[in-house]
Amino acid sequence: MRIFSEIYGCYYNIIYRLLSDYGKITDKEITEIIREKGYGESMLFLLPKLKDDVWEFFGEARPNPVIPLTSYQKSWLKTILMDKRINLFLEQEEVQGLVEQLSEVEPIFRQEDLCYSDIFLDGDDYSDDKYREFFRTVVEAIRKNEVLDIEYNPIPSKRVRHYFIPCRLEYSIKNDCIRIYGVEEKSEKKLYQINLGKVVMVKTTGRYISRDKRPDVDRLLEREYMKEPVTVLIKTERKALERAMLQFANYRKNTSRYVEKRDDDFDGTTKEIYKCEIFYGQGNETELLINILSFGPMVKVIGSERFLKQLKERLKKQRYRSA
């Protein structure tokens, strides 16, 4: 079931655009909007009706376009507002105001309905005022390409302070934390991953870099990749492929239909299997391993040997603990 109803799909948005942006509309403008926003067949279906004003959109009794929220959309928004991380993006007063407006709406689920596994319990404190301030400062610096003065504790007994160019933020499901990807201002060869929860100071500097000199994070990450990617086979049952693409969205990967000899011990059906090669750095190895294990029998690891060894050792430990 789609959260956002199809009534606000392609054709609705075309009409909304035409009614909102134009006073007197010309046939040329209608054609351009349909070509930009519509499907291939939209010109055949939609264009004649709009040109002839069959629906009487462009006359004196021109309707005022509105997009009221559906009940399901309101439930989804109520659910999002109950997430502990929402305070990173909205002020507490804004959250309370929106919750009051949705007071009679039931959320799709509540946080206490969720049972997490294979994650650390000492995640970041998203309600901490300093944490929220640091987060917003970093976000603004990324948008403006500003250099930041950041001090943090990579380990309890060590403190590091540099001028960083923040490039990207990433949320870790396993650690329940937000990481900053950035490089030092003086040397852009090394990519740093900084846990925002371990940051003790963030200051703006008023120094900016031009957009064309912005560090290429993806290229820097590729330098740290292991020699061999993790290769997994993914079933299509229970939307496993769709879930895997979402789970591994932050990794570079190659995905294709698996056309080699079928492994009946893994598949046991005539449905398609997909092969996915996932490229990763050593620092993300444990997190990737846990993410793959979370798919259970829907995913099978066939390489690399190094990763398979790590996987088997972890499974042995889990079996020993459960016994």
Image (cartoon, rainbow, N blue to C red):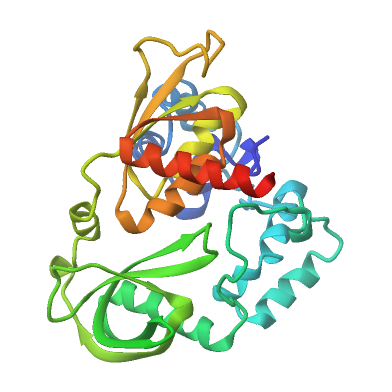
User: Is residue 58 visible in the rendered structure shown here?
Assistant: no
User: Is residue 274 visible in the rendered structure shown here?
Assistant: yes
Q: Residue furthest right?
A: 104
Residue appearing at x 49%, y 22% in the figure: 45
Q: Position of residue 121 (x, y in %)?
A: 62, 66
In the rendered structure, the answer to whether residue 169 lies left or right of residue 57 reads left
Instruction: Between residue 15 and residue 298, name the one nearer to us.
Output: 298
Tell me the quarter of the image containing the N terminus. Answer: top right
Residue appearing at x 50%, y 46% in the figure: 314
Tell me the quarter of the image containing the C terminus. Answer: top right
Residue appearing at x 68%, y 82% in the figure: 93
Instruction: Between residue 291 and residue 144, name the one nearer to us.
Output: 291
Task: Please determine whether, in this image, residue 160 is positioned above or below residue 27.
Answer: below
In the rendered structure, the answer to whether residue 30 lies left or right of residue 185 reads right
Q: Position of residue 281 (x, y in %)?
A: 29, 53
Quarter assignment of residue 195 = bottom left
Instruction: Between residue 313 and residue 240, name the one nearer to us.
Output: 313
Q: Position of residue 242 (x, y in %)?
A: 51, 33
Q: Position of residue 297 (x, y in %)?
A: 57, 29
Instruction: Between residue 309 and residue 79, name the one nearer to us.
Output: 309
